[in-house]
Every structure is written in structure tokens, then in C-alpha cells.
Image: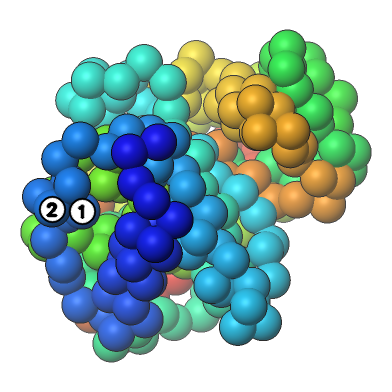
Amino acid sequence: MKLTAAQIAELAEYLESAQLERREVVKITDRYPDIGMEDAYAIQNQIKQRKLARGEQIVGLKVGLTSYAKMKQMGVETPIFGFMTDTCVIQDASEIPMATLIHPKVEPEIAFFTKAAIRGPGCNIATVLAATDFVMPAIEVIDSRYRDFKFDLVSVVADNTSATRFIVGGKATPVTNLDLAALGVVLEKNGRIEMVGAGAAVVGHPATAVAMLANHLAACGEEIPAGSIILSGGITEAIPVQAGDSISLQIQHLGGVTTRFV
Ligand code: 0L1
Ligand code: MG
């Protein structure tokens, strides 16, 4: 670790205030160019403690930077991980006020709902599918706190992987007899197709992304608890949204989910 406990606390306050006050900030590596991944997750964890202290509840976890295109762009070989609290939850077909956000983008994901804990190390697709109750289509709203949505890897991990809001909908579908890698995905904005993809865009199989999360948590003695929602990662590039935009996601066999920015 390069940072002291006081510096971690200060950077957590810096990033979380930006989120709560809906304003952009310069990335933390501009001030601390030498910090590493351990520092970044320590800052993210400190943000989590701040939210818990204010009474927010953890409702789920997320895997980010999951598409091979995005990983290559950022020069990484593994995804990154974050958390979501109850304030991130938006109901299907409801509205999201732009005034509550900075410069949001949306991306299509498959959400896993766990019925048993998933404990690494050594988790794989089979471990994850055995612990999955059902999956649903999910729209993730990401909203980096950094100026112009520009950051490096360490900065975005500290910023809780741009986690902001998510919406699940469609059918709660058990994974038995479902090939998640082969599921087709269509993301529309205002009735026009913006992105198409398939589950395999997420590290080959969305359950692999969840296994990577479990193995990452195991390194700190943690697990994915039963009853969690896991956003397994963006299947396509994220698209920017503005007030007035309606977003619709359809995933083959899983149904659809919508939201509107106002
Ligand atoms: O959920 C994600 O894949 C976002 C990870 C952070 C990078 C970004 O904000 O685009
Ligand atoms: Mg995502």
C-alpha cells in the first residue's frame, strides 16, 4: 500500500462527495500517481463504509470492464469489481431524473440472483450456475465521477467502478437448459437499435465473470452471499444518455427491461 489510512479516508470523501453532489472531479492519480490496486480497493471499501454508516444497505455486487474490447482498451486482463447499495435500485419501466446524475451511460447486462453463497478460490462456471437461483436482464447506469468520464484503472476502481443505478426486469429465468453465452442482446435508445451482442462478449461466458468476482473476494476472505444480485458486466459498449431518452433492453429468452431519463 502506498497510501496512509488518512489519505484513503480523504480520497473516499473526495469521490463520494462528488457522487452525492453530482459534480465531476479530477482523477485521483493526478495527485497520487504511484498508487496501486490495493490502495484503489481500500478507497472503494472506505466509500462502502461511509454509505453503510449512513444507513445504506448493500444489495449487490458488480463486475466491470468485462468485454474484451474494453479490457484491451484499458490494458487489463481481468475485470474489476464494485458494489451496489439500495440507493442504486430503479424499478423497471420507471424514470430516472438526470438531475440526480452527472453524465450517465447505460450498458446491457445479465443479472445473477444467488440462492447459495459462492466462495472462492477455484470457482468456475459450474460453481456459479449451481449457486444461481435465476437470471434477469439488467440495464446498468454507470456515471463516472471523473471529468469527461476519463480515468485510469486505479482511479475507476477507487470510484466503485462508476456504479450508480441499475434496473432489472423481464423474466426471472432459471439457468438450467439456458446457454447464457449464446443469448442475443438488443439495446435500443428511443426505439432505435444502438447495440447488439451476445452473452459470450462477457469474458466468454457471464458466469465466468461471477466466478472471477468470487475468486477476487476469496483473496480477502470474503464470499458472494446467498441472496445477492450480481451484475455480470456490460455485453456491449456503454451508450451515453440525456434527458428525454428511453432505453429498452431485450435479451433472448429472458425478456425485456426499460427505463427513461427525465
Ligand atoms: O460496469 C462497468 O463495466 C464500468 C466499469 C468502469 C469503467 C467505466 O465507467 O466505463
Ligand atoms: Mg457494468
Mark sitting on residue 31: 2
If the image is split into quadrants, where does the C terminus sit? bottom left
The image position of residue 44, as x and y in percent, is 46, 53
- Tell me where residue 242 appears, x and y as whole percent: 20, 73
Q: Residues within 10 Å of mark 2 (few under 14, many from 20)?
A: few
Proximity of marks 2 and 1: CB atoms separated by less than 8 Å: yes
Calculate the distance from the C-alpha at mark 2 to the C-alpha at mark 1.
6 Å
Whether residue 47 is situated above or below residue 70 in the rendered picture = below
- Mark 1, secondary structure of its residue: helix
Q: Which residue is mark 1?
A: 28
188 shown above or below 87: above
Nearer the observer: mark 2 or 1; the answer is: 2
Residue that extends furthest to the right in the rendered view of this protein: 116
Q: Closest to the observer: 190 or 8?
A: 8
Q: Position of residue 118 (x, y in %)?
A: 80, 31
Instruction: Name which residue type carries label 2.
Output: Arg
Name which residue lies at 33% across and 38% down.
Answer: 2
Residue shown at 66% from the left, 33% from the top: 220
Q: Indicate the position of residue 181 as horizontal and vertical percent values.
A: 56, 20
Q: Dot 1, crowdedness within 10 Å: few (<14), some or many (≥20)?
A: many
- State the quadrant of the N terminus: top left
Q: Which mark is residue 144?
A: none
Q: Residue at x 65, y 26 (%)?
A: 219
